[in-house]
């Protein structure tokens, strides 16, 4: 049976501890387009576009006690990283390094024509950049 998907991309919600730091990373360093923000029950949401996917940065009125376990992919099970397709991983890595963000995996070719690199956002979430020939 299954579901009927009505959009060719996903929306991703990221609960953040410091909205200014999150916006500096996602909007200013990565260049995601800010398309709006609004109050929501218990907090405030900033919406950014990554291609046709919407990234929703959520700052709650009450900071959650728990945070995601550190360590990226090998740190725990569950959602551990997400991927942005780019035309040049080296440029993405350089922008993140210049912004002071931790590069956890420098650009490397996984297989012929496919290069990745991974960085850590201000909350410790891993973002993968994927370049294909």
Image (cartoon, rainbow, N blue to C red):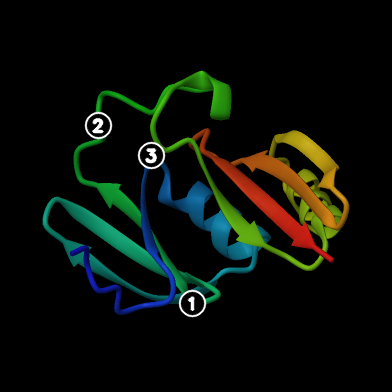
Image location (x, y in percent) of residue 32:
57, 69
Real-space CA distance between mark 2 and mark 3, rounded to the nearest whole angstrom: 8 Å
Q: Residue furthest left?
A: 41
Residue 104, image quadrant: top right
Residue 112 appearing in the image: yes
Secondary structure under tag 3 reads loop
Residue at 48% over, 77% down: 52
Q: Which mark is residue 52?
A: 1
| In front: label 1 or label 2 | 1
Most foreground residue, 9 or 2: 2
How far apart are the alpha carbons under marks 3 and 1?
Answer: 25 Å
In this figure, which residue is indicated by the disc labeled 2?
64
> Which residue is rendered at x = 52% and y = 33% of the image?
124
Residue holding disc 3: 17
Taking the image as shown, residue 19 lies to the left or right of residue 38, namely: right
Q: Where is residue 117 drawn, in percent x and y?
A: 75, 44
């Amino acid at each position: 049976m299954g579901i009927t998907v009505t959009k060719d991309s996903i929306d991703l919600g990221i609960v953040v501890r410091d909205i200014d730091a999150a916006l500096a990373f996602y909007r200013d360093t990565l260049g995601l387009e800010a398309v709006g923000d609004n109050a929501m029950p218990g907090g405030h949401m900033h919406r950014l576009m990554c291609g046709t996917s919407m990234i929703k940065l959520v700052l709650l009125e009450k900071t959650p006690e728990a945070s995601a376990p550190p360590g990226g992919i090998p740190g725990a099970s569950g959602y551990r990283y997400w991927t942005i397709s780019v035309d040049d991983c080296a440029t993405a890595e350089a922008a993140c390094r210049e912004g002071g963000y931790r590069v956890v995996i420098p650009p490397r070719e996984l297989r012929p024509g496919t290069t990745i690199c991974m960085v850590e956002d201000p909350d410790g979430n891993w973002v993968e950049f994927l370049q294909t020939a």
